[in-house]
Amino acid sequence: MDGTYTGVVDRIEDGEIAIILLEEDEQVIEQVDVLADRLPEPARTDGGVLSVTLKDSEVVSMEYRPEATRERRESVQEKLDRLSERLSDREE
């Protein structure tokens, strides 16, 4: 697998291994695991968005994308807010 993909930090296990989900057309196509200390500093958190370049299925570079991270977090928050509103409407 070669190319550059959007990667999202799914989680960091035991503070050592970052699990990154690779996306293509907003669909998860692969998972890669890297040492957490290889991540750019601001991406060392769940939900950090990266450009991940692979060569022979190995990660050769990662670039943090702060704007994409911010947009994704806002989108998730909006969805959670809408769900919360719907649940509170049912309770009344």
Image (cartoon, rainbow, N blue to C red):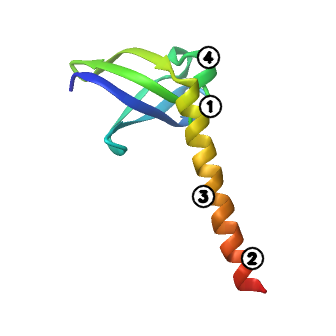
Q: Amino acid at mark 1?
A: Thr
Residue 46 appears in the rendering: no
Circle nearer the viewer, 1 or 3: 3
Query: Pointer 3: what residue?
Result: 79
Query: Pointer 2: what residue?
Result: 88
Q: Which quadrant would residue 60 be assigned to in this image? A: top left
Query: Pointer 4: what residue?
Result: 41
Mark-to-mark CA distance, 1 and 3: 20 Å
Q: Could you say which is closer to the camera, residue 69 or residue 36?
A: 69
- Label tally: 4
Residue 11: x percent and y percent?
55, 38
Mark-to-mark CA distance, 1 and 2: 30 Å
Vertically, is 83 above or below 39? below
Residue drawn where x is 42% and y is 31% of the image: 7
Q: Which is nearer the N-term, disc 2 or disc 3?
A: 3
Q: Is residue 84 left or right of residue 63?
A: right
Residue drawn where x is 38% and y is 22% of the image: 52
Q: Residues within 10 Å of mark 3 (few under 14, many from 20)?
A: few
Mark-to-mark CA distance, 4 and 1: 9 Å
Circle nearer the viewer, 2 or 4: 2
Q: Is residue 79 left or right of residue 87?
A: left
Q: Secondary structure at mark 4?
A: helix
Q: Secondary structure at mark 1?
A: loop
Query: Pointer 1: what residue?
Result: 45
Q: Amino acid at mark 2?
A: Ser
Quarter holding the C terminus?
Answer: bottom right
Q: Which is nearer the N-term, disc 3 or disc 4?
A: 4
Residue drawn where x is 60% and y is 58% of the image: 79
